[in-house]
Image (cartoon, rainbow, N blue to C red):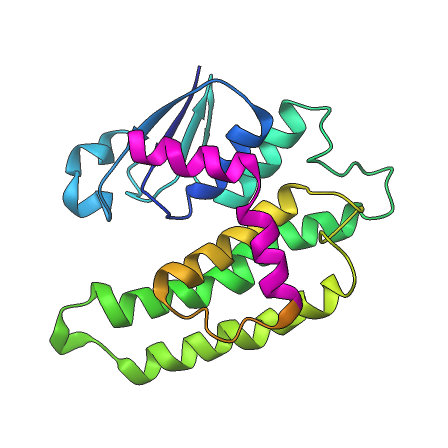
Amino acid sequence: MIQLYHCADARSFRALWALEELKLPYQLHLLPFPPRVREPSYLDANPLGTIPLLIDGDARLTESAAIVQYLAVKYGPTPLAVGPEEADYGAWLNWLHFGEATLTFPQTLVLRYRMLEPPERRLPQAADDYAQWFHSRLRHVERALGDRKWLVADRFTMADISVGYALLLAKSLKIDDGFPPQVAAYWQRLKGREGFGRAKDAQKSG
């Protein structure tokens, strides 16, 4: 059975949400955040100390965008994947990685310099700057949505999970004020999905 090591609402939520959308059986290991500090035994499973960690047979994946792509391709066919024969294949891959590399990365620095560092090491100006960076990149999502419901291929895909998690993180960090109109409506659609709700419930029950 697939195993997922997860912290509530952390990057690993992408993998949890994907598992629920695909309705795959899995075993969830819920950890305190950050696990490398608060659950040192986790380092035996993942020496990086990061989450997620997904184990599927001999496959071990620690990158959240890679995990959602892996699940869609390995456990397809599924409309959550966009195939190379489709016009939006390149856009699908780009949004999968944009969600992590471009939207989530600056938020991790907001998290660090507002919340995780000891008070004497916090850098409010740096945190504010990276929050602004996130919002400036979010304008690209607003433009892409236009009158679309989802980002690519006229359907909900793993790309929406990748980008949608970045919006969830913004809510958690309280930097979601000022979502532009299309992004705000998109966020309402995302969190209204049954798979999103099941993932939220799964992390509560552990």
Which SS does the magenta portion mostly show?
helix
Q: Residue at x 50, y 57 (%)?
A: 166
Q: Is residue 75 left or right of residue 62?
A: right
x and y, in percent, of residue 160 in the image = 63, 48
Region in magenta:
182-206
The one of 52 and 58 positioned closer to us in this rendering: 52
Indicate yes or no whether the magenta region holds residue 87.
Answer: no
x and y, in percent, of residue 204 in the image = 31, 35
Q: Quadrant of the N terminus?
A: top left
Q: Residue at x 37, y 80 (%)?
A: 128
Q: Is residue 63 visible?
A: no
Quadrant of the image occupied by residue 85 = top right
Q: Quadrant of the C terminus?
A: top left
Name the outermost residue toward the bottom.
125
Q: Residue at x 64, y 31 (%)?
A: 72
The one of 55 and 162 positioned closer to us in this rendering: 162
- Image height of 152 relative to 80, above or below: below
The one of 192 and 61 positioned closer to us in this rendering: 192
Q: Is residue 36 left or right of residue 120?
A: right
Q: Residue at x 57, y 31 (%)?
A: 21
- Image height of 168 relative to 158, above or below: below
Q: Is residue 161 left or right of residue 55?
A: right
x and y, in percent, of residue 74 in the image = 63, 24
Quadrant of the image occupied by residue 89 = top right
Indicate yes or no whether the magenta region holds residue 184.
Answer: yes
